[in-house]
Image (cartoon, grey):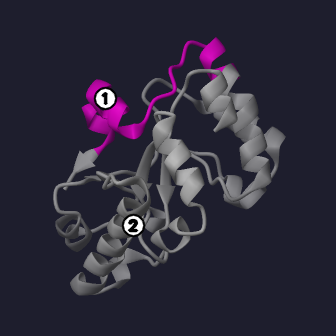
């Protein structure tokens, strides 16, 4: 967040509903600094294996959890593992289902240098870069990547902002 603020960038943070209450000040800061909070379900279950009622519960509980802290409902959802099917799309109720176009594999490598090199080698206009903020190596990579990407002419925006420029990148259910 400090690097995004310093370089006047923004991002979308997909939050688990079960974790939202653990960091209310952080979520409020995200919103106040121009970032977007998205729904990443309540418990990170693979939605395509759940009943329609359970999918709706995962999404709704997260919506309410985030709203209770930020007073805004997320309008974007990133299903865990990027897994989606017709039922997931129906349960999204008009919100954008978001997946990524560049997977940093930070969850696997947990190596700052590897993450930075992978992004800088592969990134192109309109990419949605997947990173996980629970790993320190990913946070360190973001601190390095934010100015590097801007030096290359990239603008760091939220997924909803990206949608206005690249509507093909984000599908609405």
Q: Secondary structure at mark 2?
A: loop
Check residue 83 in the rendering and tell me which mark sits there, or answer none. 2
Q: Secondary structure at mark 1?
A: loop
Q: Mark 1 — residue?
A: 166
Circle 1 residues within 10 Å: few <14, some 14–19, many ≥20: some
Q: Quadrant of the N terminus?
A: top right
Residue 96 at x, y percent in the picture: 27, 50
From the viewer's side, name the closer residue of 115 and 53: 53
Residue 95 at x, y percent in the picture: 23, 54
From the viewer's side, name the closer residue of 105 and 80: 80
From the viewer's side, name the closer residue of 7 and 121: 7
Question: What residue is shown at x 69% (from left), y 52% (from top)?
Answer: 106
> Based on the displayed image, in which of its 4 quarters is residue 83 positioned?
bottom left
Check residue 5 in the rendering and tell me which mark sits there, or answer none. none
Query: Which residues are the magenta region?
Result: 148-170
Q: Quadrant of the C terminus?
A: bottom left
Circle 2 residues within 10 Å: few <14, some 14–19, many ≥20: some
Residue 37 at x, y percent in the picture: 43, 50
């Amino acid at each position: 967040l400090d690097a995004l603020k310093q370089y006047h960038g923004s991002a979308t943070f997909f939050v688990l509903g079960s974790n939202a209450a653990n960091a209310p000040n952080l979520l409020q800061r995200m919103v106040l600094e121009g970032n977007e909070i998205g729904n990443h379900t309540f418990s990170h279950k693979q939605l395509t294996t759940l009943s329609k009622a359970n999918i709706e519960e995962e999404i709704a509980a997260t919506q309410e959890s985030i709203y209770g802290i930020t007073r805004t409902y997320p309008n974007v959802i990133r299903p865990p593992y990027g897994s989606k099917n017709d039922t997931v799309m129906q349960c999204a109720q008009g919100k954008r289902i978001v997946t990524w176009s560049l997977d940093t594999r930070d969850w696997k490598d947990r190596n700052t240098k590897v993450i930075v090199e992978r992004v800088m080698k592969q990134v192109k206009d309109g990419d949605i870069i997947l990173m996980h903020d629970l790993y320190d190596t990913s946070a360190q990579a973001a601190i390095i990547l934010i100015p590097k990407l801007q030096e290359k002419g990239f603008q760091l925006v939220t997924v909803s902002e990206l949608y206005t420029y690249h509507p093909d990148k984000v599908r609405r259910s």
